[in-house]
Amino acid sequence: MRRHFLRALAAAALAPYIGSAASQGSSNRTYRLILSMSPGSGTDALYRAYAKVLSAELQAPVIVDNKPGADGGISFRELARAGADGQTLIAVSDSMLNLLPLVKPGNYDPKSVRPLVNLTRSTAIIVTRADAPYRNLEDLLNAARQKPGELPFGTYALFYRITLARLEEASRTRFRDIPYKGTPTNTLNDLLGGRLEATIYEAGAAVPLIESGRIKPLAILGTERSPVLPAVPTVAESGYPGFSMQVLIGVGVHSGTPEPVVRALEAVAVKAARDPAMVEFANQRGAQNHVLGADAYAGVIEKDAAANRDFVARSGVMQRIRDE
């Protein structure tokens, strides 16, 4: 009874601000969640699960709209076209707002999005073929040191290219970074086919491949071990203290959205993120439920911005990507 009351209360709070459609009743309101990734990835599945829970809380449809391409640029442009209507949401991560724009300036304006809620803290894992000679991360790094710039390492997203650059800096190695577009399917196929020595994969998606004996885990990229792969050490535990590359996965709105709308949406969005179904969904896929409201999420993004600027300036990763 209390749950139904809270949903009705949230809908009533939003109604005066969401435009003329709201005044005609909740059944006429439709929300849209723009995603920068293609359908089929683990992150896409997470957002679809969230959209379902959020729809129940809003008592209105939430349509997932995949707009991949241009390293997030297409999704940002789609949000700009929709404007500050209060009914268009966008999938964002901390790195999309404080790191990727440093590497590809002008691709989109991170200030055009206001963080609304963080859902999870997701991490990925460095993997190699099951029959590869590398027993652990250090074996792979030693092989790279013996052949600087020659060992092929596949990356399928700009964030993972930056992750590899940070690993190279921390370990004083250099791989041959081979970028892929779209989903990790092509990187996996080339890894299994022997054309790559290693790649980065979402922890949850890697589990069945590890269990079936197709790939071998080397190290977790986050600050903590993954709940779905508790035996796999982190990069920090593997000899590189302080190393961590993980993603805060959340939702934002157009920065021009009126404050009352932001706060009303935030209340509903946070409640949906804490729903037991969302917590279970995230945990089963190797992500950790890590809910932050609008101000806390924005604070974390701002806090890490200076360190990201320093890394991009000294690492040369921006020049490497531009030269390709």
Image (cartoon, grey):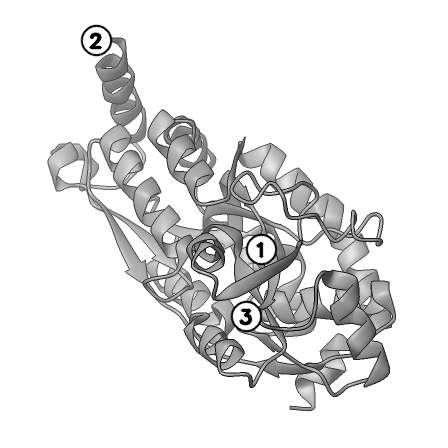
The residue that appears at 33% across and 59% down in the rendered structure is 82
- Residue 102: where, in percent of width, then height? 69, 68
Upstream in the sequence, badge 1 or badge 3? Answer: 1
Residue 173 falls left or right of residue 123: right
The residue that appears at 68% across and 72% down in the rendered structure is 133
Q: Residues within 10 Å of mark 1 (few under 14, many from 20)?
A: many
Distance Cα–Cα, label 1 vs label 3: 12 Å
The quadrant holding residue 258 is top left
Distance Cα–Cα, label 2 vs label 1: 40 Å
Q: Is residue 15 visible?
A: no
Q: Are marks 2 and 3 in contact (CB under 8 Å)?
A: no
- Residue 99: where, in percent of width, then height? 67, 61
Q: Quadrant of the N terminus?
A: top left
The residue that appears at 13% across and 41% down in the rendered structure is 28
Secondary structure beneath dot 2 equals loop
Q: Amino acid at mark 2?
A: Met
Relative to residue 70, is residue 207 depicted above or below? above
Q: Amino acid at mark 1?
A: Ala
Upstream in the sequence, badge 2 or badge 1? Answer: 2
Residue named by callout 3: 157
Q: Nearer the viewer, mark 2 or mark 3?
A: 3
Residue named by callout 2: 1
The quadrant holding residue 197 is bottom right
Q: Nearer the viewer, mark 2 or mark 1?
A: 1
Upstream in the sequence, badge 2 or badge 3? Answer: 2
